[in-house]
Structures are given as structure tokens and as C-alpha cells.
Image: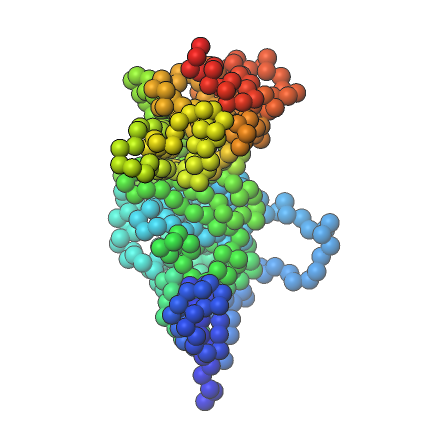
Amino acid sequence: MAKIKTTFFCQNCGAQSPKWIGKCPSCGEWNTYVEEVIQKEESGLGTWKTGQQKEKRTNKPKKLSEIDFSQSPRTETFDSELDRVLGGGIVPGSLVLIGGEPGIGKSTLMLQIALTLSKIKVLYVSGEESESQIKMRAERMKVHSDNCYVLSETNTQQIFEQIEILQPDVLVIDSIQTLHSRHVESAAGSVSQVRECTAELMRFAKETATPVFLIGHITKDGSIAGPKVLEHMVDTVLQFEGDRHLAYRILRTSKNRFGSTNELGIYEMRADGLRPVANPSEILLTQREEQLNGVAIGAMMEGNRPLLIEIQSLVSPATYGTPQRSSTGFDAKRLNMLLAVLEKRGGMRLGQQDVFLNVAGGIKVDDPALDLTVCASLLSSYEDQAVADDVCFAGEVGLGGEIRAVHRIENRIAEAEKLGFKRIVVSKYAVRGLDLKKYKIQVVAVSKLEEMYQGLFTS
């Protein structure tokens, strides 16, 4: 009988050690090392057999100029937001990992995609729900498909046996942390099990050109649960974000070998599933019956998509000693920097004021072009004067109070014009060489915060 080989793995980062240690040298966490068996069975090597499946790809080296990828076109879904995030559709042989908080809608999104791909054969493997539970969810969506197959199984060997019989065109795994392979003697969800199961699925995807979607759990700090090598192995990593108490969900790309990593998709959660939002700018702008001070509209970019969002602020005298600085959806350190610029360069006495900032819609933003919008919102609340509802902003604010140019200003101007805004305030350095006559919207070019302030509140 062969000796059983064991080693110790960090359950936080996946680091390996021949003996138990208290503190992980890689991630610095304490008491995360667990002993796991790494001895594999000698019989039945290779859980995925390609003899009876689709034709296996050749392993002979080819010249780069001889490789033809036109024979493997992308598969477009009926979900425009998912196609945008993936870079134009599903790539054959791709391995896509989708992570998100519990209850955010990961399983709903994947089941909805499996049902809408009615022309191709889809196998939905669930290790968390029974077949009847999946049927109940599908009935709520009111979408029917004769090519969507459901399998409730956690053993990878059993899953691959059914794959050989069914030969699906798309495979969905819900979730990767529930699968286990008999070749690794450890609990499901452990570092070695997640790594081994992902490697088997990656082998299957690459050898058969079958797209595989993996649903992954996340830790309390928001990262994908399991070893970090999991994110390195897959082709695309998607993050499903949003507040469970709000109706809208955001699908972000943090890694994509087949497209941009800055794309964003927005969904609306309904009783019958997730609805893609074609024009997110309209839902991010609050409908108001009257003008309110402290509200300003900014033009931002998420990947190739321009968005208009609403920035809300409240500036009031501090009554409890130390002034409060609170920010929701916007970087708090950048807010403090803008407050310092307004006080130093603009002469505003904000040192004894409580400042509260909120990005409407419950999303998080990091575009520097929103600096000018934040300043306009703060000044509006400080002066107790409302900004006209037909004005929007796009510009970065420097430490000297100067308005710096931002990229893709043409897309921002076009988006503001499409939504009916009359004026957009931008940096004068951003409109150099730009034909402003082709726009119906008035482009106001400024170089300093003083010019923006005079145009808004002294005219």
C-alpha cells in the first residue's frame, strides 16, 4: 500500500507548506493552515476522457500566421449586458468565473442565460440546489427551453460521465466550491479541491472548445473564495455587485482575456428575473419635481460606455465638535482632497462644516472626471443655491484648483446631449481641436474652479 502524502495549505491564499505554521508568510493571516491529502489514485488517471467526446484539438505547434480563429466565432446571447461585459459574446473554450455575495443573483443570472440560449444545448450543474428548486426558479422567470438540462451533482467524475452522454455546448457549474474530486482526499471547498476541480474543468473546456461558466463564493472582504490561483486559471473573472435592498445589480469585469477589463453591465432585479438595463443613465438620475441644492450631474466612463450619474451632497455646520466627513460610493480620501482645494483655492470655509456625499443609484465610482461634479455639488449645498437641472459636468480637479482634461470627452458630450442636457462644463484643455459646432448642447470650457463658480452662482 502506497504511503499517503499530505501537506499543509493556507485556506486564505492557497500557499503550501510541508509543515504546520501559525502565520502564513504569503498573506500574513494566522491559523489558516490545514493538512490535506495530496496522494492521488493510480487508477483512472485523468478524469476527463476525450475519446468519445468532440474532436480533440491538435497539440502540434503551429505558426502564428497559420492559426485561423475565424472558425470559432463568439456565441451571442440574448443578454446585451453580458455580451458587452464578455467582450462581444461567449468565446468557445472559455472558462468564466462569476463571483458575488450570497443572494445577489448569480444563480438567477446563469439560469436565465441557460434558458435563453434555446438553440444550443446547455447543461446546468448545481451542487447547492435540487432539481425541483431549480424548476421553481425557472417557472418564476417564465422562460422555457427544451435544450436546457439540469443535473444536481457534486462529484466531478459523475458530472463528466453525464457530459460524455449529453455532449452539451455550454456548461454551467453552480458552484465551484461545492464540487469534489475523488482524486483529492479533502473536504469540498478546500484549496486542493477547488484547484483540482477547476483544473479538470479547464482541461475539458480547452480540449473540447466548450464554454464553461463557474459560479464562485466570495469571502467577507469581497474576494473570490479559495486559492488565488483560481482567478489565474480562468479566462474571465466577473464580479456581480449591488445592494440586496436595491433593485439594481452591476456586473463588472476584473479580468478578461478576450476583451476590455473596464466594462460594466447593469441589471434590474425583478420577480421574474434580471432585466438588462439598456440606458443606465436614466435610472441613475433621480426624478425630481423641483430643483434642490447640493445636487449635480456628472458624465463618467465605464469602459466604453458613458454614464450620467447624480452626485448628492449636504454641507451643514458642525454642532458636535469635530466635523464629520462621510462618503457613499465615492473615495473618502479624494473627497477630503477636494474639500482642501475648495478651502485653499476657493476661499470656502469648510473646516467647521459637516460634509455628507452620496452617489445616487447605489453604485461605486472612481472616475476622476467626477471631481468637477463633486465640487459643484458641494458648492451648491454650501451656497444654498441649486444647480440648473440642464447642466452636467466632466473634469478633473488638480491641487491648484485647475480643471484638467479627461479622456473620451466626445462620448461624454454626446451622452449628455442625447439625454436632453443644455450645457456641459468641461476643461478648456479637453476641447482643443474639437469641433463644437456639431453638437447642439452648449459646451462651456473653464480652466479654474473660480470660473465654474462664477458661471453657476453669480450670473
Above or below, comparing residue 255 to residue 40 in the picture: above
| Residue 414 appears left or right of 435 | left
Closer to the camera, 152 or 88? 88
Closer to the camera, 37 or 175? 37
Closer to the camera, 252 or 109? 252
Q: Residue furthest top?
A: 459
Looking at the image, which residue is at 71% across and 52% down? 64
| Residue 321 appears left or right of 203 | left
Q: Residue furthest bottom?
A: 1
Residue 33, given in percent of the width and then of the height, sits at 41, 71
Residue 182, given in percent of the width and then of the height, sits at 41, 73
**Does any portion of residue 396 appear in the rendered image?**
no
Above or below, comparing residue 440 to residue 21 in the picture: above
Looking at the image, which residue is at 41% across and 76% down? 35
**Does any portion of residue 109 appear in the rendered image?**
yes
Closer to the camera, 155 or 346? 346
In the figure, residue 360 lies in which quadrant? top left
| Quadrant containing the C terminus in the rendered view | top left
Residue 232, given in percent of the width and then of the height, sits at 53, 57
Looking at the image, which residue is at 30% across and 29% down? 317
How is colour applied across the structure in the image?
A: rainbow
In the figure, residue 271 lies in which quadrant? top left
Residue 218, given in percent of the width and then of the height, sits at 38, 55
Looking at the image, which residue is at 61% across and 59% down? 57
| Quadrant containing the N terminus in the rendered view | bottom left
Count of numbered tags: 0
